[in-house]
Image: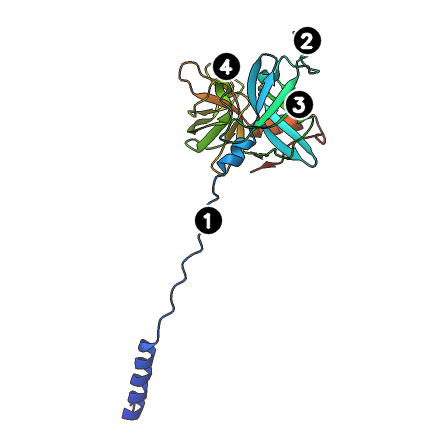
């Protein structure tokens, strides 16, 4: 049997244990969500002028060189080895504006490196880069349905216009397209003539598509995924001469 002295010691120890302060639980670390830099996004999408028409493009940097991806039909009548010009030499002009203003920061030209008229995208190199140019990151993924997206372009020459929407379908063959093998990102973000060649960006400001066409009935927009553009640039090339860095 336990003696009274032992029992007293045990009770005292229990009392001390109960009175000890419990450790404060440490809350789990929450990683801050990246804040979308809309001005950076807009600044990476200059106005593209060709002949008597206009469109948009998305700039990127590769080493000391600057490239741009746009829609093929934006510069379809410009000189290139795959499709000769139909009405003489046309200069591809690239004009950058300060976001949210009509202030021109630079004006330069571009030359075609690769063009895919079927998927409707073109890779160009900027002839004379400017220090005020801003550059986009490009995604190497197909987005998810319902994902929030931002479209940047120059509809009807309203340069640097931003519209927001969602991905209606991530990999759709449009009813307005006769070639059912072609797939595009379908979005309800608003665009118009001049939006072509502009960028479709995700919530992190990564360009995931190049705007190429509009449904004339629903007024929704289609963009060729940068995932397919990445494949197209690399096709037949062991080491592409100039291309953006694609990220997942």
**Residue at screen point 54% across, 28% down:** 103
Q: Earlier in the sequence, mark 1 or mark 4?
A: 1
Mark pair 3, 1: CA separation: 39 Å
Tell which circle, 2 or 3, labels the residue nearer the N-terminal end.
Answer: 2
Which residue sits furthest front?
103
Q: CA distance from mark 4 to mark 2?
A: 29 Å
Residue wearing tag 1: 32
Marks 2/1: CA–CA distance: 53 Å
Residue at image mark 3? 110
Numbered badge on residue 88? 2
Residue ID for mark 4: 177
Mark 3 in CB contact with mark 1 (< 8 angstroms): no
Secondary structure beneath label 3: strand
N-terminal of the two: label 4 or label 2? 2
Depth check, mark 2 against mark 1: the one in front is: 2
Give the residue at the far top of this rendering: 87
Q: Position of residue 185 (x, y in %)?
A: 49, 25
Q: Earlier in the sequence, mark 2 or mark 1?
A: 1
Q: Quadrant of residue 189?
A: top left
Report whether residue 42 is seen.
yes
Label 4 secondary element = loop
Q: CA distance from mark 1 to mark 4?
A: 41 Å
Closer to viewer: mark 1 or mark 4: 1
What is the residue that sits farthest to the left in this orientation?
A: 4
Q: 145 or 192: nearer the eye?
A: 192
Query: Residue at coordinates 42% horizontally, 56% vertically from top-left?
Result: 28
Q: Secondary structure at mark 2?
A: loop
């Amino acid at each position: 049997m336990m003696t009274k002295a032992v029992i007293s010691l045990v009770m005292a120890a229990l009392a001390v244990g109960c009175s000890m302060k419990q450790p404060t639980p440490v809350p789990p670390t929450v990683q801050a969500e990246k804040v979308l830099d809309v001005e950076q996004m807009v600044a990476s999408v200059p106005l593209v002028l060709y002949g008597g028409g206009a469109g948009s493009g998305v700039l990127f940097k590769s080493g000391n060189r600057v490239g741009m991806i746009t829609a093929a039909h934006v510069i379809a009548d410009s000189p290139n080895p795959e499709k000769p010009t139909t009405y003489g030499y046309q200069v591809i002009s690239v004009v950058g504006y300060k976001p949210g203003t009509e202030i021109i920061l630079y004006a330069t030209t571009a030359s075609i490196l690769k063009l895919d008229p079927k998927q409707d995208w073109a890779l160009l190199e900027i002839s004379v880069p400017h220090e005020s140019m801003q550059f986009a990151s490009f995604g190497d993924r197909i987005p998810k349905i319902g994902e929030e997206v931002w479209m940047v372009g120059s509809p009807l020459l309203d340069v640097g216009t931003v519209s927001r929407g969602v991905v209606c379908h991530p990999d759709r063959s449009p009813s307005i397209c006769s070639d059912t093998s072609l797939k595009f990102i379908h979005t309800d973000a608003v665009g118009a003539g001049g939006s072509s060649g502009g960028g479709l960006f995700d919530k992190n400001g990564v360009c995931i598509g190049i705007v190429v066409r509009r449904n004339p009935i629903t007024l929704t927009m289609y963009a060729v995924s940068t995932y397919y553009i990445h494949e197209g640039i690399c096709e037949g090339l062991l080491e592409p001469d100039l291309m953006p860095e694609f990220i997942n």
